[in-house]
Image (cartoon, rainbow, N blue to C red):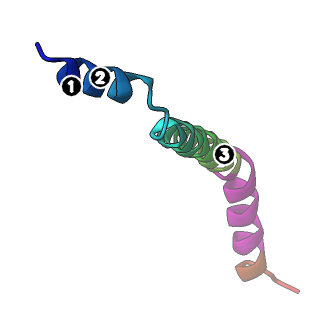
Amino acid sequence: MGVQAKEKIMDTLTRRSGEGFVDTALKILISVVVGALLLAGLYMLFKDTILPTLTQRIKDLFDYKG
């Protein structure tokens, strides 16, 4: 192995120019996970709390005998 090849390998290994890509990927991954958790929470809220109440109110509205 030549001296130039060793220098090129060492230069490649010590370079830190791609360091920002890991940070960006981690931010995107965290955003996706938090968004999925938020959507799952909203889905459960609508499924268990809001939709039954809304359905009952709509039925009461159309069954008005006033």
How far apart marks 3 and 2 lie (CA) works out to 50 Å
The residue wearing badge 3 is 38
Numbered label attached to residue 61: none
- For badge 3, the amino acid type reads Leu
Label 1: few (<14), some or many (≥20) within 10 Å? few
Q: Is residue 47 magenta?
A: yes
Of helix, strand and loop, which one carries label 3? helix
Q: Please name the predominant secondary structure of the magenta segment in the image.
A: helix
What range is drawn magenta here? 46-60
Of label 3 and label 2, which has the lower sequence position?
Answer: 2
The quarter of the image holding the N terminus is top left
- Residue at image mark 1: 4
Whole-number angstrom distance, CA of label 2 to CA of label 1: 5 Å
Q: Nearer the viewer, residue 54 or 22?
A: 22
Residue positioned most to the bottom: 66
Instruction: Name the residue furthest left.
Output: 1
Residue at position x 51%, y 36% in the image? 19
Q: Are marks 2 and 1 in contact (CB under 8 Å)?
A: yes
Residue at 29% over, 23% down: 7
